[in-house]
Image (cartoon, rainbow, N blue to C red):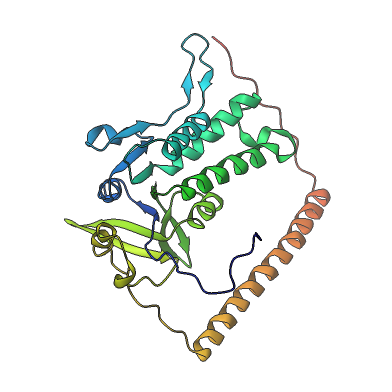
Amino acid sequence: MGLLPKNQPKKTVDTPRNFFIWGQTMHGKSYLASQFPNPVIFNTDGNADQIETPSVNLKNERDPKTGQISFSVIDQLNELIKELETTDHGFETVVIDVIDDVVTLIEQAICEEHGVQYIGDIPYGKGFGIFKSIFTALVVKLKALPMNVIYISRYATVTENNIEKPVPSLSVKHLNTVNGNCDMNILCQKIGKNYIRRAVDRRKAYQREWIQDERILAILDTVIGAFDKPTQTSKEEAKKIVEQLEKQEEQVMQTSEAEPEAQTESKEESKQTPKPRTAAPRPPRVK
């Protein structure tokens, strides 16, 4: 039998199963995740101890005698995922709370294994390659589970055109890996006494009638924008947007070209103008 599929349309899965949930502390992220069907929480910040949802504390376990890592979070996650794959556990949702800390724990394990303080200190960029391989494999394994998967991240801000914009605290390169394997990105906010959930991004323009799991539907009905129809952009509007992007790219290129010239001029000036000699600072006294 050949490996190719039949040359005919196939039925799609239109119920979102993988979610990225983010927001400020105590803005309802973990609470939203706990509402999903039969969840188990892989927790890093200790908050799982405050709720009744079954949980596992993720950590780099250390030998009490040597202080060295004896069972890393990498091994722990691999064992946990294996149990989810092979045992009759009854869970329907796995929650990673919070994914930011998982990144730190993985980096810590890699650094200690190679005897360095910073992952970039591993020669030839090997440390970053090792991390990317482990982290990507983790996300892919989680997505392959026949379960809902939820990643929780904290909150940060960036300034664009003098406007402060909220973003997940997970770094962009790691966010791209996670988001690329998620169906919906949800921002949780507390405004006054009201808790707001807003769909920031979606893999599809989901419609209510597509959702086969009524429990997921009940949750998505509380998320603003989960089922909004996408706005169609006219050809004229698209052309204006492209022109603006091209202008921004041109400005960035002009700035990057001007910077080396400014640095060269600065070096030449420093060569022409000798600096007065100053006495070397004395080392601090040790008492």
Residue at position x 70%, y 64% in the image: 256
Residue at position x 47%, y 85% in the image: 233
Relative to the observer, which residue lies in front, 30 or 205? Answer: 205
* Residue 73 vertical position relative to residue 3 in the rendered view, above or below: above
Left/right of residue 195 with respect to residue 1 in the rendered view: left
Total marks shown come to 0
**Residue 38 placement (x, y as % from top left):** 28, 44
Find the residue positioned furthest to the left.
193
Relative to the observer, which residue lies in front, 113 or 194? Answer: 113
Left/right of residue 286 with respect to residue 57 in the rendered view: right
**Residue 250 placement (x, y as % from top left):** 66, 74
Left/right of residue 97 with respect to residue 282 in the rendered view: left
- Location of residue 132 by image quarter: top right
The C terminus lies in which quarter of the figure? top right
- Location of residue 226 by image quarter: bottom left
* Residue 143 vertical position relative to residue 232 in the rendered view, above or below: above
Residue at position x 27%, y 62% in the image: 217
Find the residue positioned furthest to the front.
1
Relative to the observer, which residue lies in front, 262 or 211? Answer: 211
The N terminus lies in which quarter of the figure? bottom right
**Residue 107 placement (x, y as % from top left):** 56, 35
* Residue 233 vertical position relative to residue 221 in the rendered view, above or below: below
- Location of residue 186 by image quarter: bottom left
